[in-house]
């Protein structure tokens, strides 16, 4: 009868081969996390670019309104073919193909406004600005009391 000494070939043949349940669960969790990371990184690039542009323009509009309040002089935001002009300074769009439309409460006979006016008073008229890129739109708006922000589009 063979002895059960370490390194005995007969004893080594009775060992089970394979993975434990814990090892399999760890591998599945790692694969799930990697898949989630890849799917999030593959988000629509034009949508992300438009969101970034909207956040940038909203920040610039709010800063310009604060500047107008501090100086007592109204500031104008105007759209340009390759960007926009704010307080006399030209800014290019972050992405080629971006364009903006200024919206306001207007009657049918009035022409569409070409500019936003950020006055020195704390409360301004409600204003909207729609940015578009690659068929996608984002609207920035203020109700006159709150700062400009991105609003959901229906």
Image (tube, helix red, strand yellow):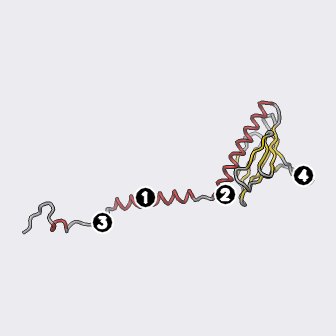
Q: Which of marks 1 and 2 is nearer the N terminus?
A: 1
Q: Mark 3 points at which residue?
A: 18
Residue found 35% across the figure and 59% down from its top: 23
Q: Distance between the residues labelled 1 and 2?
A: 31 Å
Q: Distance between the residues labelled 1 and 4?
A: 58 Å
Q: How far apart are marks 3 and 2 (CA)?
A: 47 Å
Looking at the rendered structure, the number of numbered marks drawn on it comes to: 4
Q: Mark 1 points at which residue?
A: 29
Q: Residues within 10 Å of mark 4 (few under 14, many from 20)?
A: few
Q: Earlier in the sequence, mark 3 or mark 2?
A: 3
Q: Distance between the residues labelled 3 and 1?
A: 19 Å
Q: Is mark 4 on a helix, strand or loop?
A: loop
Q: Quadrant of residue 48?
A: bottom right
Residue situated in front as seen by the camera: 75 or 93:
93
Residue found 79% across the figure and 39% down from its top: 87
Q: How crowded is mark 3: few (under 14 residues within 10 Å), some or many (20 or more)?
A: few
Q: Distance between the residues labelled 3 and 4?
A: 76 Å
Closer to viewer: mark 1 or mark 2: 2
- Contact (CB < 8 A) between labels 3 and 2? no
Q: Residue 46 carries which label?
A: 2
- Residue 128, image x, y percentages: 78, 48
Q: Quadrant of residue 39?
A: bottom right
Q: Name the residue under label 4.
A: 111
Q: Residues within 10 Å of mark 1 (few under 14, many from 20)?
A: few
Q: Which of marks 3 and 1 is nearer the N terminus?
A: 3
């Amino acid at each position: 009868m063979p002895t059960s000494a370490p390194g005995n070939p007969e004893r080594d043949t009775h060992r089970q081969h394979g993975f434990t349940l814990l090892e399999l669960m760890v591998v599945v969790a790692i694969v799930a996390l990697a898949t989630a990371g890849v799917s999030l990184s593959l988000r629509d690039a034009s949508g992300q670019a438009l969101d970034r542009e909207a956040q940038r323009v909203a920040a610039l509009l709010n800063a310009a309104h604060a500047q107008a309040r501090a100086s007592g002089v109204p500031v104008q935001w105007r759209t340009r073919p390759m960007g926009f002009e704010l307080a006399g300074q030209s800014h290019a769009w972050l992405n080629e193909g971006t364009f903006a439309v200024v919206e306001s409460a207007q009657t049918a006979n009035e022409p569409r406004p070409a500019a936003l006016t950020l006055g020195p008073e704390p409360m301004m008229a409600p204003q909207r600005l729609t940015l578009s890129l690659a068929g996608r739109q984002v609207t920035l708006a203020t109700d006159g009391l709150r700062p400009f922000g991105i609003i959901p589009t229906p």
